[in-house]
């Protein structure tokens, strides 16, 4: 849903007629309106403090929403998504959740056969790539088994976000591998450029009661652990010299597709979705909360 399309949601009592149609830069202030674009209020055309509301650059460059606008938008998106589409929202981590990336220079001798395989047509789960710029580092990225089936199935039940501690360029390349046509995520990709310190559902435009997070690292979600499904960490490549057992790459094996991390998480997500929408009347959906459903599931399930 476009942010710009939501502008008319602001109460009419707060809207003002602007004459002339030029922004006022005399002094920056907090005008109290809902939408700011590149530091200028879209309602009163005044220059606004940069800390008014929250920035949503990943959806539309330069846009800021007031706290009130965020709250209303989250509520309405969840309401429409649940009522019309029968979909919840799903936030997915990338590294060690959907894939594993390593530097080419970090490969062990036993892993170097992968360099040739990554450049061949024999594998569709292994990629060699390098970012643009001076002295770029070469990387290998290995997709987690079942990832494509997982995204296809999850997309039927959830509106999906990616939330990564990698930068925008890294996320863009990964999206070209797992979602080249933008079917699953669209512009809903949050990176460390927008969220450098911790991960938060404040940047996800959906009410927390309808959002499930899948991540291998619990500590990066200090305020939203009740929404979190902690998936087992996917390590395909060697991670350090003191590693006790050989990695999948050296053993030339891999995680099970049928009983691996993503397959098990998908089963849980389907259960949560089913539990959320198991109501007699549609109005009962307004009291449903994925956090209570996850708590019930985790009472007998460990990390997946």
Image (spheres, grey):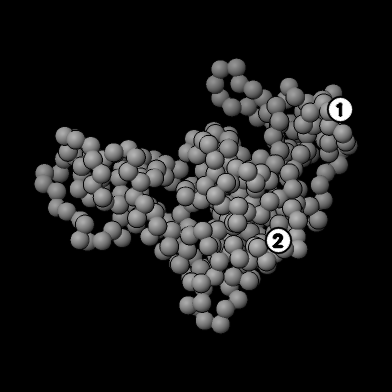
Q: Is residue 66 left or right of residue 115?
A: left
Relative to 31, say whether 72 is above or below.
below
Q: Quadrant of residue 75?
A: bottom left
Question: To which residue does mark 1 refer?
Answer: 110
Quarter where residue 8 is shown: bottom left
Instruction: Identify the residue at the far top of this view.
Output: 135
Circles 2 and 1 in contact, beta carbons < 8 Å: no
Kindly give the residue lying farthest to the left in the view shown: 19
State the image coordinates of residue 1 (x, y, percent, origin top left): 42, 56
Image side of residue 237 versus residue 61, left or right? right
Query: Which percent across, then down, holds residue 179?
Result: 59, 47
The reply to whether residue 113 is visible in this rendering is no
* Residue depicted at 30% across the width and 52% down the height: 34
Question: What's the distance in space between the residues labelled 2 and 1, CA to CA?
Answer: 39 Å
Question: How many callouts does the rendering have?
Answer: 2
Would residue 79 be visible to someone looking at this image? yes
Q: Residue at x 74, y 43 (%)?
A: 234
Q: In percent of the image, x 14 and y 48: which residue is there?
A: 18
- Give residue 247's position: percent from left, percent from top: 83, 36
Identify the image quadrant of residue 64. Answer: top left
Disc marking residue 298: 2
Crowding at dot 1, Cα within 10 Å, few <14 / some 14-19 / many 20+, comes out as few
Residue 289 relative to residue 14: left or right: right
Q: Position of residue 21 (x, y in %)?
A: 15, 44
The mark nearer the N terminus, 2 or 1, is 1
Instruction: Kindly identify the residue that appears in the image at 51 percent across and 51 percent down.
Output: 201
């Amino acid at each position: 849903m476009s942010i710009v399309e939501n502008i008319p949601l602001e109460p009419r009592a707060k809207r003002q007629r602007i004459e002339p149609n030029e922004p006022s830069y005399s002094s920056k202030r907090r005008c109290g309106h809902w939408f700011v674009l590149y530091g200028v209020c879209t309602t009163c055309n005044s220059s606004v403090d940069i800390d008014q509301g929250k920035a949503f650059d990943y959806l539309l460059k330069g846009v800021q929403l007031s706290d009130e606008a965020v709250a209303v938008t989250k509520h309405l998106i969840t309401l429409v998504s649940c009522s019309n589409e029968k979909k919840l929202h799903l936030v997915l981590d990338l590294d060690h959740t959907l894939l594993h990336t390593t530097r080419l220079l970090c490969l062990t001798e036993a892993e170097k056969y992968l360099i040739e395989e990554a450049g061949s047509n024999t594998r569709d789960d292994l990629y060699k790539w390098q970012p643009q710029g001076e002295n770029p580092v070469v990387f290998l990225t290995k997709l987690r088994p079942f990832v494509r089936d997982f995204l296809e199935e999850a997309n039927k039940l959830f509106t999906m976000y990616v939330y990564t501690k990698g930068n925008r360029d890294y996320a863009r390349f990964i999206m070209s591998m797992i979602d080249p046509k933008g079917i699953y995520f669209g512009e809903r990709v949050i990176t460390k450029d927008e969220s450098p310190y911790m991960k938060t559902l404040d940047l996800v435009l959906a009410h927390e009661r309808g959002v499930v997070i899948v991540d291998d690292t619990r500590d990066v979600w200090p305020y939203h652990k009740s929404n979190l499904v902690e998936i087992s960490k996917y390590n395909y490549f060697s991670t350090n010299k003191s590693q006790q057992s050989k990695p999948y790459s050296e053993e030339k094996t891999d995680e099970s597709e049928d009983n691996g991390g993503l397959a098990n998480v998908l089963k849980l997500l389907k259960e949560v979705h089913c539990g959320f929408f198991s109501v007699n009347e549609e109005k009962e959906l307004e009291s449903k909360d994925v956090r209570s459903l996850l708590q019930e599931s985790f009472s007998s399930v460990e990390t997946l």
